[in-house]
Image (spheres, grey):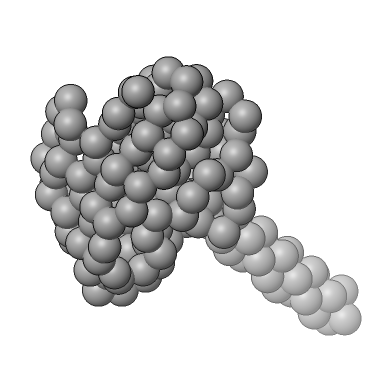
């Protein structure tokens, strides 16, 4: 009789261990395949990621008017996370940039930055959060620059324009 009870206890233990293994495997599969490996929202807080040449972003909804020669465009993003290059500019010695913006951030975090690509540094944070205004930067050395939109779960809309001048 005792042997029979011990066999039943062993079976119960085996079933419990098997069930725990199945649950653990299901949780690991969920974590591996459902959750993103890289959260692009981290770029907003990490300048090293922001300065990388690769655009990494995600948005549930995105509307952006194309930028032309003298760039101007409306934009709207829902749950925008990451960094997106919206304009790349080649300037000659003593170049200048003139920009204006009108940005409304409904939720999350959003900024617009000017990056010196060759020296891998942020020259200016043009806008951080909801704001409007205009600004200019003069005497930029010869080189390649870019404007990036950067966000973390940002529901944002607005207008941004940029004009370049090479003297």
Residue 166 position in % (x across, y down): 34, 23
Residue 17, quarter of the rendered image? bottom right
Give the side of residue 52 with respect to residue 89, left or right.
right
| Observer able to see residue 75 | yes
Q: Please tell me which residue is depicted at 27% across the width and 56% down the height of the picture.
A: 134
Looking at the picture, tell me which residue is in the foreground, 98 or 71: 98
Q: Nearer the viewer, residue 157 or 102?
A: 102
Residue at (25% x, 40% y) in the render: 162
Residue found at the very far front of the displayed protein = 167
Asked if 104 appears above or below 96 in the picture, the reply is: below
Which residue lies at the image location 52% right of the left edge and 26% below the top edge? 141
Residue 76: percent from the left, percent from the top? 17, 55
- For the image, the number of numbered tags is 0
Looking at the image, residue 27 lies above or below residue 93: below
In this rendered view, identify the residue nearer to me: 64 or 72.
72
Tell me residue 130's x, y (percent): 30, 70
Seen in the picture, residue 49 relative to 30 is either above or below; the reply is above
- Horizontal side of 12 relative to 105 (left or right) equals right
Find residue 132 and report its horizontal and vertical position in percent.
25, 66
Is residue 114 found left or right of 101 in the rendered image?
Answer: right
Which residue shows up at 40% across the image and 22% down it? 91
Which quadrant would the N terminus be assigned to in this image? bottom right
Can see residue 37?
A: no
* Quadrant in the picture for the C terminus: top left
């Amino acid at each position: 009789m005792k042997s029979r009870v011990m066999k039943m206890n062993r079976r119960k233990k085996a079933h419990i261990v098997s069930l725990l293994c199945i649950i653990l495997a299901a949780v690991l599969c969920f974590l591996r395949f459902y959750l993103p490996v890289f959260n692009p929202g981290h770029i907003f807080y990490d300048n090293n990621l922001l300065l990388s040449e690769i655009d990494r972003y995600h948005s549930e909804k995105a509307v952006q008017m194309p930028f032309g020669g003298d760039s101007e465009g409306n934009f709207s993003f829902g749950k925008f996370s990451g960094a997106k290059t919206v304009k790349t500019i080649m300037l000659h010695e003593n170049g200048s940039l003139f920009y204006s913006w009108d940005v409304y951030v409904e939720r999350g975090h959003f900024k617009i930055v000017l990056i010196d690509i060759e020296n891998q540094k942020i020259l200016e944070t043009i806008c951080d959060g909801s704001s409007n205004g205009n600004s200019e930067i003069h005497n930029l050395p010869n080189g390649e620059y870019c404007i990036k939109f950067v966000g973390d779960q940002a529901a944002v809309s607005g207008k941004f324009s940029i004009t370049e001048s090479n003297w």
